[in-house]
Image: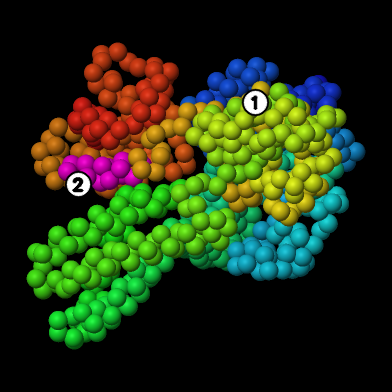
C-alpha cells in the first residue's frame, strides 16, 4: 500500500519545481515507505514538462493543455492518488529530509487528524504566520483587512487570523491549514470530498479545512519539521490582481458556509476591503514609480524660481516680474519636456550614468528653444531656458548622487555596487556556482567558499564577476573557513549574500543555518539545487522568488530596448487607427482589430512578442509572434520547438526594425 501521495501543481515556475522535486525525492527516501509523486502542469510555457520528464522519470506527470486553476488541477491527481496520506505541496517549497517521516508518524499517532500543517519559513528563514490560521469569520476578517491584526498580533481577539497568541514552536489544534503544505488523510478526503472547484486560486484551502472540521476531523499545526516557502511566484501579493482574486475567494466562502445574514455582512466587508486594498495597491505602485519624478520636478521648479527672481532683479531689460503663468504653466511644461527626454535617454535606468542625464536635458533644451520660437505669447527668456537646463542637470545628477551616497556611502554613480558573495559548499560545487554567476552576468564579488568539511582555511583573493567576465585573479582554491565559523566570516568580509550548495548540504542543515545566523548585518540566502542551473532565493515573504540562471541575457527586456519597443507600439497603434478605414476591409475580425489597437495603445498588449517562451512578469501579451511572421512566408506548419527557437533568436537579437517588418508581413492578421 502506498503510504504517501505528493501532489504539486505547477504553472511556469520550472526553477522552483526542480528544487521542490529534489527535496521531495530526498524526503521520500528517508520516509522509507512507498511514495508516489504527481506533478500537474497547467500548460506552462517555460519547459517545466520537459524538465520533469528528463530529470524526474519517477514522477507521474499530468500535462494540461490549458490552465484550469489550482483546485481542479489538484483534484485531477487526488482522484487517482492511492496514498494513505495525500500531500498538497506548492512548487515554491523546499521540504526537510525528515519532513515526510515526521508528518506521517504524527498522523499515525493521531487518528483524529484529518489535516496537518507545518512550520513554514520564507526564503530568508523568517517564520511565516500563515502556518497557522483561524477561520475568517466576519470579525476575524474585519480585524485582518483593516490592520488591527497587524497592530495587535498577539491579541486573542484582534490577532486570531494568524493565531499569533499561539506558540509557534508548539503543536496546536487549528482551524485552517495552508495550501502550500496541506497533508490530508485519504479517509477524511473520501468523507468530506475534494477541493471545491469554484475557487480558481486562493480560498480552497480554507474551504477544505473548514469541511474537515465539520466532518468531525481535527486540523493540527505541527512544528516538528520545517519547510521553506518562497511565495509570490504566481501573484505578487501587493498587486491589484491578488487583491481581487483573494478577496473574491473569501466572498465565495462566506456565501457557502455562513448564514445569509452573516454572509451579507461578510460580503459587504469584503467589497469595502477590495476597493480599499486595491486603491492602496495602485497608489503604492504609482508612488514608487512617480516619487523620483515628483522629487526631480520639485527640485527643478524651485531652482528655476530662484533663477527667475535673480534674472528679474539683475539682468531683465525691464525689471518687472514675469507673469504668473510663467511659473504656473510654462516652467511645468519645460520640466515635463526635460524629464521625458531624460527618461527616453535612459537617465532613470540602472546603473545611473551622468552622460544619459546630460544628453536628455540638452535634447530637451533644444526642443524647448525651437518650439518657443513659434509661440510669441509664451516666449519669455532664452537665457532662462539655458540656465534652467543647466540647473536641471545639476538637480538630477545631484539627487541621484545623494541617494547613491546614502545607500552605498560612495559617489561612484555610474558603477553598480558589487554584492559580496560567499558560497557554502565543496570546492567543485563552489566553482560551478562561480561559473553560473558569471554566465548570468550577476554583478558580484565572490569572496570565496566556506567548506562543509574540515579544510585548511586560507585568505584567497576574491573574484569579481560582471557582464560575463572575470576580471581579477582566478577563484581561490582554499576555503575561507569552516561552516562553524560562518557567522564570523559574514562579519569579517561584510557579506551581502550566501549561496548554499544543495548537493553538499541537506535542506535541514540549510534551514538551521538560516535560523541560527545573526540578522545583523542582513544577509540574503540563495540555494543551488543539485545538478541544477538555477540559483534560487527570495528577499522576503511578500517578494516573488528570484533566481540566477545560465540562460542567455535577452536584449528584448533590457530597459532601453523595452522603452523603444513601447514607443514603437504606440506609434504603430496610432498609425493603424488612422489607417483603419482602409485596413478594416482586409481584417478577418474587424472588432478585434480595433480592440487590439486600443489594447496596445493602453499598454495591455504588444504588437510583437513571445508566446511559446516565458518572459518576465512585466512582459505584455503578444498579438503576433516571430513564428507568425515566419509562417506567413512558409507553407509548412511550424512545430513548437521551431517556434521556441524563432522566439529565442528574436528576444536575443531584438531590434525595433524587427517589429516593423513582422507587422508589415502580417498586416492582415492584426485582428487576430
- How far across and down, in percent of the image, does residue 656 sit? 28, 35
- How far across and down, in percent of the image, does residue 229 sit? 68, 42
- How far across and down, in percent of the image, does residue 11 sit? 54, 34
Q: In the rendered structure, find residue 574 and report the number of the disc placed on it.
A: 2
Q: Nearer the viewer, residue 80 or 458?
A: 458
Secondary structure under the numbered disc 2 in the rendered image: helix
Can residue 663 be seen?
no
Query: Badge 1: how crowded within 10 Å, few (<14), some, or many (20+)?
Result: some
Q: Nearer the viewer, residue 620 or 487?
A: 487
Q: Nearer the viewer, mark 2 or mark 1?
A: 1
How many numbered badges does the structure rendering display? 2
Helix, strand or loop for the magenta stretch, by majority: helix
Residue 572 belongs to the span the image colors magenta: yes
Q: In the rendered structure, find residue 142 and report the number of the disc placed on it.
A: none
Residue at the spot x=76%, y=68% of the render? 155
**Looking at this rendering, what residue extends furthest in the bottom direction?**
320
Q: Nearer the viewer, residue 630 or 305?
A: 305
Asked where in the image residue 520 lies, by quadrant, the reply is bottom right
Q: Is residue 649 above or below residue 343?
A: above
Q: Which residues are magenta?
A: 562-576
Residue at the spot x=65%, y=36% of the render? 462
**Looking at this rendering, what residue extends furthest in the right direction?**
109
Secondary structure under the numbered disc 1 in the rendered image: helix
**Looking at this rendering, what residue extends furthest in the top direction?**
636
Name which of mark 2 and mark 1 comes first in the sequence: 1
- The answer to whether residue 66 is left or right of residue 670 is right
Q: In the rendered structure, find residue 432 and report the number of the disc placed on it.
A: 1
Give the quarter of the figure containing the C terminus.
top left
Amino acid at each position: 500500500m502506498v503510504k504517501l501521495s505528493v501532489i504539486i501543481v505547477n504553472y511556469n515556475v520550472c526553477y522552483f519545481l526542480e528544487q521542490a522535486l529534489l527535496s521531495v525525492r530526498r524526503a521520500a527516501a528517508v520516509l522509507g515507505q512507498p511514495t508516489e509523486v504527481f506533478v500537474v502542469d497547467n500548460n506552462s510555457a517555460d519547459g517545466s514538462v520537459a524538465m520533469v520528464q528528463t530529470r524526474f522519470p519517477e514522477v507521474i506527470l499530468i500535462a494540461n493543455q490549458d490552465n484550469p486553476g489550482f483546485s481542479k488541477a489538484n483534484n485531477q491527481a487526488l482522484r487517482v492518488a492511492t496514498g494513505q496520506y495525500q500531500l498538497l505541496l506548492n512548487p515554491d517549497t523546499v521540504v526537510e529530509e525528515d519532513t515526510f517521516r515526521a508528518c506521517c508518524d504524527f498522523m499515525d499517532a493521531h487518528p483524529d487528524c484529518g489535516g496537518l500543517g507545518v512550520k513554514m519559513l520564507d526564503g530568508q528563514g523568517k517564520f511565516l504566520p500563515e502556518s497557522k490560521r483561524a477561520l475568517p469569520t466576519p470579525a476575524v476578517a474585519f480585524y485582518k483587512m483593516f490592520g488591527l491584526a497587524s497592530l495587535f498580533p498577539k491579541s486573542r481577539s484582534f490577532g486570531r487570523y494568524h493565531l499569533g497568541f499561539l506558540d509557534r514552536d508548539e503543536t496546536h489544534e487549528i482551524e485552517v491549514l495552508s495550501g502550500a503544505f496541506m497533508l490530508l488523510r485519504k479517509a477524511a478526503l473520501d468523507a468530506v470530498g475534494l477541493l471545491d472547484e469554484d475557487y480558481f486560486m486562493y480560498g480552497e484551502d480554507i474551504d477544505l479545512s473548514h469541511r474537515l472540521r465539520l466532518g468531525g476531523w481535527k486540523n493540527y499545526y505541527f512544528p516538528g519539521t520545517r519547510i521553506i516557502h518562497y511565495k509570490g511566484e504566481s501573484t505578487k501579493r501587493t498587486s491589484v490582481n491578488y487583491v481581487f482574486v483573494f478577496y473574491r475567494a473569501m466572498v465565495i466562502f462566506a456565501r457557502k458556509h455562513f448564514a445569509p445574514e452573516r454572509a451579507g455582512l461578510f460580503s459587504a466587508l469584503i467589497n469595502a476591503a477590495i476597493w480599499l486594498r486595491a486603491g492602496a495597491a495602485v497608489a503604492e505602485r504609482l508612488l514608487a514609480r512617480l516619487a523620483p519624478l515628483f522629487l526631480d520636478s520639485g527640485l527643478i521648479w524651485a531652482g528655476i524660481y530662484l533663477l527667475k527672481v535673480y534674472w528679474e532683479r539683475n539682468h531683465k531689460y525691464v525689471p518687472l516680474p514675469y507673469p504668473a503663468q510663467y511659473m504656473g504653466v510654462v516652467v511645468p511644461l519645460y520640466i515635463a519636456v526635460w524629464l521625458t527626454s531624460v527618461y527616453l535617454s535612459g537617465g532613470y535606468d540602472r546603473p545611473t550614468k551622468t552622460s544619459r542625464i546630460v544628453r536628455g536635458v540638452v535634447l530637451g533644451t533644444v526642443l524647448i528653444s525651437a518650439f518657443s520660437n513659434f509661440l510669441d505669447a509664451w516666449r519669455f527668456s532664452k537665457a532662462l531656458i539655458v540656465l534652467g537646463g543647466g540647473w536641471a542637470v545639476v538637480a538630477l545628477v545631484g539627487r541621484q548622487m545623494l541617494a547613491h551616497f546614502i545607500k552605498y556611502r560612495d559617489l561612484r554613480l555610474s558603477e553598480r555596487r558589487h554584492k559580496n558573495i560567499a558560497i557554502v559548499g565543496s570546492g567543485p560545487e563552489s566553482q560551478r556556482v562561480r561559473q553560473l554567476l558569471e554566465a548570468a552576468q550577476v554583478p558580484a564579488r565572490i569572496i570565496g567558499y566556506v567548506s562543509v568539511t574540515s579544510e585548511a582555511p586560507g585568505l584567497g583573493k576574491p573574484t569579481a564577476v560582471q557582464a560575463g567576465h572575470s576580471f581579477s585573479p582566478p577563484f581561490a582554491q582554499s576555503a575561507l573557513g569552516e561552516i562553524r565559523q560562518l557567522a564570523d566570516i559574514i562579519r569579517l568580509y561584510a557579506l551581502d549574500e550566501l549561496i548554499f550548495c544543495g548537493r553538499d548540504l541537506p535542506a535541514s542543515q540549510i534551514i538551521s543555518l538560516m535560523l541560527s545566523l545573526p540578522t545583523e548585518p542582513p544577509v540574503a540566502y540563495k540555494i543551488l539545487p543539485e545538478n541544477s542551473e538555477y540559483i534560487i532565493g527570495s528577499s522576503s515573504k511578500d517578494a516573488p522568488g528570484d533566481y540566477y540562471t545560465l540562460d542567455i541575457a535577452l536584449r528584448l527586456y533590457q530597459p532601453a530596448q523595452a522603452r523603444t519597443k513601447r514607443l514603437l507600439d504606440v506609434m504603430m497603434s496610432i498609425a493603424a487607427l488612422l489607417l483603419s478605414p482602409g485596413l478594416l476591409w482586409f481584417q478577418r475580425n474587424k472588432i478585434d482589430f480595433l480592440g487590439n489597437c486600443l489594447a496596445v495603445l493602453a499598454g495591455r498588449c504588444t504588437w510583437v512578442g513571445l508566446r511559446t517562451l516565458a518572459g518576465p512578469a512585466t512582459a505584455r501579451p503578444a498579438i503576433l509572434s516571430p513564428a507568425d511572421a515566419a509562417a506567413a512566408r512558409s507553407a509548412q506548419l511550424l512545430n513548437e520547438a521551431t517556434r521556441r527557437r524563432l522566439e529565442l533568436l528574436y528576444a536575443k537579437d531584438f531590434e525595433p526594425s524587427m517589429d516593423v517588418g513582422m507587422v508589415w508581413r502580417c498586416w492582415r492578421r492584426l485582428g487576430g
